[in-house]
Image: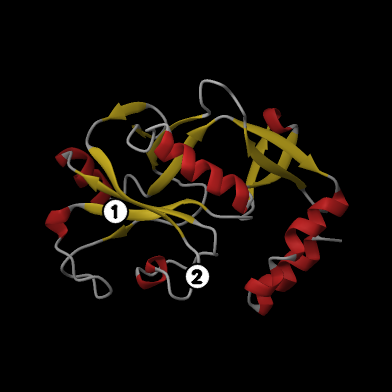
Amino acid sequence: MMLKKIEMILQKTEGGNINAVSIVKSPAVEKNFVLFSKDNLKMAIDEEKQTVTAPLLIPYQLIYRNSDFYLGECELFFSEETIRDASILLMKDGKINNVTLDHDNKTDGASCIELWIVSNSENDKANELGFDVADGTLMATYLIEDVALWSQIKEGKFNGFSIEANFDAIELNVADAKKELIGLLSEMDNTEKLEIQNTLY
């Protein structure tokens, strides 16, 4: 049975619609931090720099949810356009350095030093760091100056990023959902293609 597909679109509000970036235990995008250290074979950067890199949003990645808010089981996704708009607002509204921990306590110990959208996944810095993400993915690197937070990240208590924002949830009908998802097939290996195709019918 095909789950409902819900596209998340940034609300157009006068006061702004992005609030913060949260450092979280379980990122919805399912891509964890890359920890830079002198022992990292991909990036020979000293751990003393205390930086972490991870995706903020990945286009068309299906995120499972089961809650009364969405009236049961569904899969959420963000389009490339929404991700591009989010990246602009994060910088324009100065929210990129509003950082919380697990969507709760605010921290002043983390600052964004890089924000970019992947335009060529095979040749992008994200790929060099070991991330397998699609074109249109919003990536970020944060400098962690809080000693306790850095220790928690190294211990695996925090593993990625999540955006705090106001979104409208638009449910797609079956035809629209197929149209949105079928374009992903060319980017996937045969096993993934089969899994997606099985959900389209």
> Is 108 above or below relative to 34?
above
- Residue 39 numbered mark, or none: none
Total numbered badges shown on the rendered structure: 2
Q: Is residue 163 left or right of residue 157?
A: right
Residue 30, horizontal then vertical, whole percent: 49, 54
Residue at 71% of width from left, 33% of height from top?
70
Residue lying furthest top: 15
Front one among 40 and 172? 172
Residue at 53% of width from left, 28% of height from top?
17
Residue 82, horizontal then vertical, whole percent: 60, 45
Q: Nearer the viewer, mark 2 or mark 1?
A: 2
Residue 45, horizontal then vertical, whole percent: 18, 65
Residue at 61% of width from left, 49% of height from top?
81
Q: Is residue 84 left or right of residue 34?
A: right
Q: Secondary structure at mark 2?
A: loop
N-terminal-most mark, 2 or 1:
1
Q: How far apart are the two marked residues, 2 and 1, measured between alpha carbons?
A: 21 Å
Q: Secondary structure at mark 1?
A: strand
Q: Is residue 35 left or right of residue 126?
A: left
| Mark 2: amino acid | Asn
Residue at 26% of width from left, 41% of height from top?
111
| Mark 1: amino acid | Val
Q: Answer few, some or many: residues within 10 Å of disc 1's Cα (few below 14, many 20 plus, some between 14 and 19).
A: many
Q: Where does label 2 land, which residue?
A: 120
Q: Answer few, some or many: residues within 10 Å of disc 2's Cα (few below 14, many 20 plus, some between 14 and 19).
A: some
**Which quarter of the image is occupied by the C terminus?**
bottom right
> Is 159 above or below relative to 107?
below
Residue 144, horizontal then vertical, whole percent: 22, 45
- Residue 52 numbered mark, or none: 1
